[in-house]
Image (cartoon, rainbow, N blue to C red):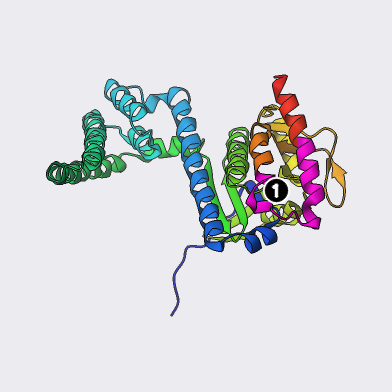
Amino acid sequence: MTTNTQDPKPVTGYVTFADILGWKGIWRDKDEIEVVKSLLFIEEKCNQWIDKYQFEYLLELSETKLHEFYKSDYKKAALKEILEGNRNLNDLILLGQDTDDNISKKFSDLIYERQRINNFVVAMVEYGDEVQLNIAKKEQTKIQKQYDDVKQQSEVSSEKFDKAYSDFKIELSIELISDTFVITSYSSRMKNEIYIHSSIIRKLIGECLRKDMLIRGATSYGEYYKQGKVFVGSAIDDAASWHEQGNEIGIFFTPKGYILTEKETAQKCLNEKLLCLRKPHLKTKSNSYQTYFVNWGEYYGEFKKAICSDSYKIILPEIVNKIMQSDDCGKKLVKFSSKE
C-alpha cells in the first residue's frame, strides 16, 4: 500500500543539535524511566518557551508592522482580554485574521467568557463541588463551540493577514531523538530569528541543568528539509558534525553558522547577555576559532548543583576535562554579566 505524502520543501534557517554530556553514566546509574521522564519534561518546557517567545514577538508586531490588523476598538478590547488571560498565541493570530468588526466583537466577548468559565471550572474542582462542576462543564462546552464557530468564520477572511504575517513569521520547533535535542527554525527575518532561536537554546541549557543534565551542542545556518523527525540538508549535516566537538557545556555556532550570521547581521543582532562573541577563541576537540556562543551564565548555580548530583555520581574520564572547562567558562560568564 502506498501513502500519499506532500513533498517536503527546502527552507533556510538555523539548526541546533545538542546532546547530554555523560549520557552513558546517567543511563547506567539512574532509573531509566525517570531519565526518560526528565527528557520529555525538558522538551515540553521548551515548547512552552517557544509559544511564549512567539506570542511576545507577534504582540510586538501587532503594535508596529501589523498594527493595521489590531487597531479597531473591538480588537483592542479582545487584545486586552488575551493579555489578561492565558496569552494564547492562536488567539492572537485569530484576532489578527478577523476583518469583520462584528466577528471581532463576538470574539472579544467569547475570550472573556471562556476565561471566566475556565477559571470557574478550576475553582469547582478545588472545592470538590460536583454539582456546580457538572453545570460549569456543560457551559464550558457550549462556549467552546461558539468560540470554534467564530474561529471558522474569521478564517474565511484571513488571507490578507496571513500574507502580511508570513513576511515576519518565525517557524520554530524542538524534537527529541534519544538524548539529542534538535531545534530548527526558519524565517525571512534573520535578525529576529537568531534572537528567538538563541533564546530557546539558552532556555534548553537552563532546563537541562535544572534536571541535573549537562548539555553541549552546535548551531548552524543554511538550507535543510524537515518532515516529522526526518532531517536532511547542509545545515543539518553541519550542526550534527560539530555538536560533539564541544569541549564544555553550552552551545556554540559552527564556522559556517558564524560566518553566515556575521555576514548577514554585521553584529547588529549581538546582545551579549544572550549571544556572546567567544574571546579567547572557542577550543573544540580538533581546533579553535572565533565564534558566537550562548551566554548561560545565569545558570551557573544550577551547573554547580548538577555536577554534585546523583546524575554525576561518577564523572567518567572522557568528560572530566569538559566539566572543568565548563566551570571555568561559567565563572567568566558570571563575572562578565555582573559588569553589565
Q: Position of residue 277 (x, y in %)?
A: 76, 32
Residue under the image location 23 percent in, 33 percent down: 116
Task: Tell me the residue that label 1 is attached to.
Answer: 216
Residue under the image location 24 percent in, 44 percent down: 148
Q: Give yes or no for residue 318 being in the magenta stretch.
A: yes
| Residue found at the very far right of the displayed protein | 287
Front residue of this view, candidates 322 and 245: 322
Task: For residue 18, say whether it is visible.
Answer: no
Location of the C terminus (image quadrant): top right
Task: For residue 262, say whether it is visible.
Answer: yes
Which quarter of the figure has residue 177?
bottom right
Which quarter of the figure has residue 10?
bottom right
Q: Give yes or no for residue 252 being in the magenta stretch.
A: no
The magenta segment: 306-329
Label 1 crowd bin: few (<14), some (14–19), many (20+), radius 10 Å:
many
Q: Is residue 235 left or right of residue 128?
A: right
Q: Position of residue 333 (x, y in %)?
A: 73, 30
| Residue found at the very far bottom of the displayed protein | 1
Residue under the image location 50 percent in, 44 percent down: 45
Q: Main secondary structure of the magenta part?
A: helix
Q: Position of residue 168 (x, y in %)?
A: 51, 35
Circle count: 1
Residue under the image location 44 percent in, 69 percent down: 4
Location of the N terminus (image quadrant): bottom left
Front residue of this view, candidates 284 and 326: 326
Q: Is residue 241 left or right of residue 117?
A: right
Q: Is residue 130 left or right of residue 264?
A: left
Q: Position of residue 102 (x, y in %)?
A: 21, 30
Front residue of this view, candidates 264 and 139: 139
In what element is the residue under mark 1?
A: strand
Which quarter of the figure has residue 233?
bottom right
Mark 1 belongs to which amino acid? Arg
